[in-house]
Image (tube, grey):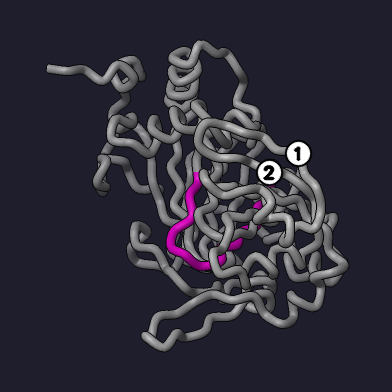
Amino acid sequence: MRVNKLTASLPRRKTTRLYSSSHGLQPVDSMKTQLHNVDIDGFRQRAFFPQQPLLITERQNQALPSIGTVSTCSIPAASKWFSTITNPDGTPTVTVSQYLSSFCHITTLPYELIQEVGVDSNDYMGLLNQPFEQSQSLSKRLHRFNAPLSVFLQALDMKHRPSIYIAQAQISDLPKQLQDDLPTPRLVKEAGKGDIYDANLWMGTPPTYTPLHKDPNPNLFVQLASSKRVRLFNPTVGAAIFHHVQSNLGKSASATFRGNEMMEGPERAALDEAVWGMLLSRQGFETTVGPGDALFIPKGWWHTIKSIGTDINASVNWWFR
């Protein structure tokens, strides 16, 4: 019998499985409520103090995505920045509202653009209207640059939409009116000491991707539009997966968040296979974060995130303690 060396090398622990995904991953514990109504003491006891992930949602099945929908949560940006239209075939599609478009020339944001194989970089120059450094790998090219919000809106109108991601845009850098649309949730301010280390916006055209990594602070991740799938591993299991991949590649890098190596080339492919492929460790968790859902990711828990569907997706997160 062939043994999966990665799985065999990871520590075993006893668990009670309430759910089994196609890969045998466990579901994240969930609290059925809206974010603004969450019981702070209950959250502390179930998630914050024991350092366990928790999905705050009103959905009955956390494994089912909500595609083509916009959140009606207590964060105004969800309903002010996005809207849902119905296509001729009856399917819903998420679009950017005229309200958000009015900020297109006064808001500068950090972008990641994935250039597919066979597409000349000059094809993107009309979109960017500026030179940019190229980071070339075997399969894709990752371009990072700062540009106005108008670049994202132009990309939405292209016949073949590029995979473009406004990644980790600090809320504090947005115009004051847009900052006000992203108020800090009560849970972030009251569950712990009230210290907030950073708050960020994530908005892109699929497929958007965040590679396996860990954060130095607890994280509240809130979905505004469309859905994302998240896989999580506790600190011991996640570290074993990451260092196994590094060892196989002959490397010893740290888990630098969104480093070029993690975003493209052999390291991206190896990490992706380790956590999304058929030979992944069964000692992980998986959940779908839909519009209005909030996912608490404890300090040190390894996680990776992928968009679902073909619509615009948007999220916001707060690192706090």
Q: Which residue is mark 1?
A: 133
State the residue in front, 140 or 8.
140
Element at label 2? strand
User: Please, what is the three-letter code of the amino acid marked with disc 1?
Assistant: Glu
State the residue in front, 60 or 51.
60
Q: Is residue 135 left or right of residue 56?
A: right
Question: x, y (%) of residue 73?
Answer: 58, 72
State the residue in front, 140 or 47.
140
Q: Pointer 2 and pointer 1: residues touching (CB < 8 Å)?
A: yes
Q: Can the viewer see residue 296 in this picture? A: no
Q: Quadrant of residue 300?
A: top right
Q: Can the viewer see residue 279 in this picture? A: yes
Element at label 1? loop
Asked whether 308 falls inside the magenta stretch, the response is yes
Q: Is residue 111 above or below residue 59?
A: above
Q: Quadrant of residue 244?
A: top left
Q: Residues within 10 Å of mark 1 (few under 14, many from 20)?
A: few
Magenta-drawn stretch, dominant element (helix, strand or loop): strand
As measured in the structure, the alpha-carbon distance from the residue carrying label 2 to the one carrying label 1 is 7 Å
User: Please, what is the three-letter code of the amino acid marked with disc 2?
Assistant: His
Question: x, y (%) of residue 150?
Answer: 76, 67
Assign the N terminus to one quadrant of the image.
top left
State the residue in front, 318 or 70.
70
Q: Which residue is mark 2?
A: 143
Assign the C terminus to one quadrant of the image.
top right
- The region drawn magenta spans 305-319
Question: x, y (%) of residue 89?
Answer: 37, 85
Residue sitting at 48 percent across and 49 percent down? 306
Residue sitting at 48 percent across and 16 percent down? 249
Q: Is residue 100 left or right of residue 264?
A: right
Residue sitting at 76 percent across and 39 percent down? 133
